[in-house]
Structure formats: structure tokens, C-alpha cells
Image (spheres, coloured by chain):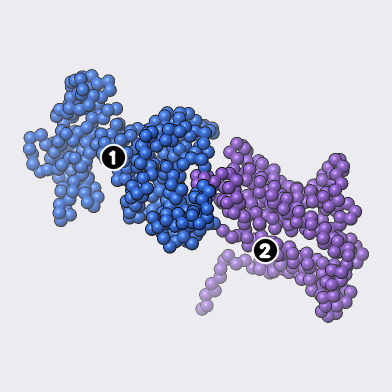
Amino acid sequence: MKQATRDIRILPGFNWVTLAFFLYLYLPLIILVVFSFNASRSATVWEGFSVDWYFKAFANDDIRRAAANSLIIATVSMVASTCIATMAALALARNRRIRRKPVFSGLIMLPLMMPEIVTAVATLTFFAAIGLSLGLGNIIIAHTVFCIPFAYLPIRARLQGMDESLETAAQDLYAGRWDTLRLITLPLLAPGILSGAMLAFIISIDDFIITLMVAEAGSTTLPIYIYSLVRLGITPEINAVSTVLLIISILFVGLSYRIGKKR
Amino acid sequence: MSAAIRAERLRKVYPGSPPVAALKSASLEIADNEFFTLLGPSGCGKTTLLRLVAGFESITGGTLHLFGEDIAHLPPEKRPVNTVFQHYSLFPHMTILDNVAFGLRRLGKPRQEAAGKAQEMLDLVQLRDYGARLPNQLSGGQQQRVALARALAPRPRVLLLDEPLSALDLKLRQSMRLELKRLQRETGITFVFVTHDQDEALAMSDRIAVMSAGEIQQIATPGEIYEYPANRFVAEFIGDANFYQARVEQVRDNGATYLTPFGTRLAGPLVEGAEPGRSVTVFVRPEKVTLTAAATEGNLPGRVRDVIYLGDTTDYRITLEQGGDITVRAENHKDGRPLANPGDDVFVELDPSALRVLKE
Ligand SMILES: Nc1ncnc2c1ncn2[C@@H]1O[C@H](COP(=O)(O)OP(=O)(O)O)[C@@H](O)[C@H]1O
Ligand SMILES: [Mg+2]
């Protein structure tokens, strides 16, 4: 008689649920991408392949302006938040006089858990209260702030895995503190910093709620512009822009992951 | 010529709750060109003392001079002292050559010159062709030698070595001992070597400072430390010893006579507070006692309790008829047989000159 050798760790039905979940997650995205190549105006009925919508989107001045705004905001916020996150991580890890480091570290990461709408309203109120009106500057400041915890996470992780005696060794070999930072600490921290920067970039480029609150006229970003287009009806042009955003995000997340993994 | 290092009542307390007094009051003088060893069990403050000299920790109390100069306020990068770290601490993102050239570059040497000197150092530690590799492409022993080359390259006046051999296996450790000794002779640099391994200390050092619980117990040459340990801790930490209580019989100007528990008399140095009748500790190293079958006058009868085979020698634990134990270490017969077996009745020959009085 044939003995059924079953792995008791395999549970019936679990595979199917998991598969359904993947479909539910990725099918809409796949459809979005596919219809960005549709030849007709319809975003639901397939009528042949074309890349016209991409050209149309790139030719659209409003989209170009929104995309430029998004890129400027994301780039500046990325640089600023990564610098601040690096300094904060080093200060918290290396300064022996700071007590209760976990509390500070927690305070830096708390915004990750805060409801974004609350942060958005708070930022708006705050900017209004101090009368801040710098156009894109307002958005950049807001983005820099909420990108810091995202940039901080991989940098801190990298720093925790770093051997402090390397910095001691550099000092022992006549390197002052700035030489030590430049030649030892930063190069060893670089994967964490790059990884954090890329996370900050994609978090900034797809932010909607906070941007919507603090954006003034003329500083529309891509997500906000897409939202305003959608309200007028979905066209493959939106699909095309969304696809470009999607690709940028995937690229950056992938890179961030690869770099973060590297020793 | 002033001493390479002079520490007076050097003290280090690590803050915290409770604070840790890692170094209580250490005074020592290390001569230029000396191979000086700090020896002691783990946690006794050896690394702390090195870190104070290197400048990685601030001094809590006392003074520290390097070639006559007070260095308490100098940051590590301003001290002509380099360290070989316990876990090497090679820079993982730099090639071996860049690692070795690091100190020279920081001192302002041009790239070419620094690379040339670094290559010389690699030659010196027999790693000529490894310059282009990264640290993780080297074995532990090779990394160890790179760490050595890196610390020696800037020609420090003092080299600090923190248990540099502890991560290596026995054979490598033994060959590195010779190598370190050779490097010290060839470079003429003062070495301060930290170890918890007594064999290492005895084999390499000009002088040894034995430490325990944040205090220096004795500073002397290997021979003096072994033959005339200052106290029971030193006698026990370096080599093995049998301890007994003897009684002061007579006090003279420059010494005293002691009555040993074996009925013999022993002339020895004056122990502090010695007065007739007082009890003092005496000891004898197990290899200075012999095992014999002859019941000659003065030999002590006993019975073998344990036999511990050590390869080249064997330890015999013997219960003496008069009471008490003694351990005898003896070479085996030429054919490898031990001299006695558990339960054998034997005699122990104890030359009075092998017994030493502990001063405290
Ligand atoms: N940074 C530190 N903070 C608090 N205590 C320390 C620190 N470094 C060492 N100690 C303590 O000081 C004592 C001596 O340590 P150390 O000098 O490293 O000893 P050794 O090198 O002889 O093993 C130990 O009890 C150790 O726990
Ligand atoms: Mg140590």
C-alpha cells in the first residue's frame, strides 16, 4: 500500500489565499500599466498598442511643471533629511553624555506611526501661524521633516553594526575628528546613508496629504495633479504618468534594498 | 634619558551606577627600548591602562608622562603612540597597503612616500604581496601582522599591544612570539604588551607588571617574578605552587629564620611585622620537589593520590604522612612511563633552598 508522506507543516487552503492576495495586490497595478499603452482614449477597453499617451503626457505643460516641482522637492528634501538624519544618528550613537538614547531615538521615529493627516494639519497650522510663505519652500520644509525618520532608520541600523574601535584606531593613527569622519565613519556608513536617501526620495515624491495641505497655488506636485485629473475622468494619460512614478519608486526601493544589504 | 612612560598613582574610574574603579592606583616606569608586559587575569584593568596611555580614556587621577612630557591633556592623535588592537580593527574598506599607509598619510607624508614605507612594513611582517587585498581576504594571523605593520609604520615611540595573540591558535601564537620579539629588537621601539597568558609574558618580556583587580602587584623581570613573587596572588598566577604556613623562629638584622612544617629551618628575607612565633606563608614550585623511592633521612613519606599526565611531565598529588598535600612535577621515564601510580607509597625530597617565604 502506498504510504502518504505528508508534510504536516503544509496547511490546506493557505496557498490559495496567499495567491489571491497577490492577485488582488498586483492585478490593478498591472492593468494600470497595460492600459497606459492603450491606443484609444478608454482606460477600460483595449484597442491596440501605442506609446502616444506617454508623448502626450510629456508634452503637457501642466504635467511637466508638476513633475519638475515633484523632482525639485524630492531631491532637496532627500539631501536635507539625509544630512540631518546622519547627524542625528551619529550624535545619538557617539555622544557619551546623552542619556536615555532610546527615548531620543524613539522620538525621531515616532512620526512614522503618527496619522499623516494630523501631521498635515499641524504643519499647515504652524506655517500659517508663523506666516511662512515660500512657495515650494514650504513643501520642502514639510517633506524634509517627515522624511527624516525614513532616512534615519537604515543609517542607524548600519551604525549599530559598525565597530567603534575602527574610529578609535583612526584616531590612534593621527586622524583628527574630521579626518576620522571623512575617511572612516562616512565611507563605512555610506550604504546606510544611500539607502536612507533613496527611501526619503520616494517617500517625498509620492506624498499627497501633507503636500495638499501646505501647497500654495503654483506649487502643484505630480500626485496632486494626478488626483485633480482623475476627478475629471480617467484617461490613459494618467496611467502613463502613474506608470512612470511607479517605475521610479520600484527602482529606488530596489536600489535602496540592494545597497542596504551590501556589506 | 627619562623613562618612556612614567605613571604615578594613575587612577581610572568609569562613570556609571555604580562607578567602576578599573585602575585604582598604578605607578610604574617603563624604560625606553623595553619590552614591557602587563600580565593579569581578565578584567584586572590592563586594557584600561593601555587606553589611558593611548589617550582613548581620560585620566581620573594621578599623572602620566611620556618621555618626560605630561600627556594627560593630549588627544590620541597627538601622542607618538600606536596601538595594536585586540581584534585588529583593520579598516575594512581599505586595501592592506592603504591600511598600513594610513598613519603616515595622516602625518602629512606624500602619497608615494607613504606607500613606499607601507610596503617596507609589509615586507617586514612577511606580507609582501598582500598590499592590494582587502582585510577580509586575509586569515586571522595575517590580519594580525597587518595590524602590527600598520601600528609600526608611523614609527611611534611606544607601541601598545592589547592581547594581540589571543585570537590565534597555539602554533601561530608561538611563532608570533618570536616575531614580535624580533620586531621589537629591530625597530628599537618600546613595546607595552598586554596578555593574560603567563607563558607569553615569561617568554617575551624584559620586565613584567603583574596586575590584579586594578592594582599592580609586582614589577620585575620574568625570573624574579617566577622565583621571588611578591605575594600569594603573583605566586599563584604565574606557575603552580604548594603553599604552607611556617613560623618565624628568629629575627635578625637583615633576615629571619623560619621553621617549616617539614621540620626544617629556612633562612629568608625579613617579612613585614615578623616576630618570633608569628606565622608566614612559604611556597615551593612543584618542579623543584623530587619523587624518590629512597627512605633517606629528611625525605618525607607519603602516598600518591592523583597522577595527572601532562605530556612532557606528570603531576603527582601526594598526601604526606605528616599531614597536608604536596604536588610534585617530574619528567616521565624515557619510555614515557610515569614514575608512580595512584596508591603507591613514595618519598618526597624537598631541598630547603627550594622553599621561599612570601613577603606578604
Ligand atoms: N567603558 C567602560 N565602562 C565601564 N566599565 C568598564 C569599561 N571598560 C572596562 N570596564 C571595567 O573595568 C574593569 C577593567 O577592564 P579592562 O581594563 O578591560 O580589563 P582587562 O583588559 O584587564 O581585561 C572591568 O571590570 C571592566 O568591566
Ligand atoms: Mg583587555
Pinpoint residue B254: horizontal percent, then vertical percent.
21, 22
The answer to whether one can see residue A230 in this image is no
State left or right for residue B341 relative to residue B150: left
Choose mark 1 or mark 2, whichever is in front.
1
Q: Residue A241's quadrant in the figure? A: bottom right
Query: Which quadrant, please, contains the N terminus of chain B?
Result: top left
Q: Name the residue under label 1.
A: B222
- The three-letter amino acid code for the residue at tag 2 is Gly
Q: In this view, does A235 lie above or below A189?
A: below
- Are the numbered discs 1 and 2 placed on the same chain, yes or no? no
- The three-letter amino acid code for the residue at tag 1 is Pro
Q: In this view, does A29 lie above or below A99?
A: below
Pinpoint residue A189: horizontal percent, then vertical percent.
60, 53
Pinpoint residue B223: horizontal percent, then vertical percent.
26, 39
Pinpoint residue B297: horizontal percent, then vertical percent.
7, 35
The answer to whether marks 1 and 2 mark residues whose Cβ atoms lie closer than 8 Å is no
Q: Distance between the residues labelled 1 and 2?
A: 61 Å
The shade of chain A is: purple
Question: Residue at coordinates 56% horizontally, 58% vertically from top-left?
Answer: A263
Q: Mark 2 points at which residue?
A: A254
- Is ligand 1 within 8 Å of the beta carbon of the residue shown at mark 2? no
Q: In this view, does B217 lie above or below A188?
A: above
Chain letter, colour blue in render: B
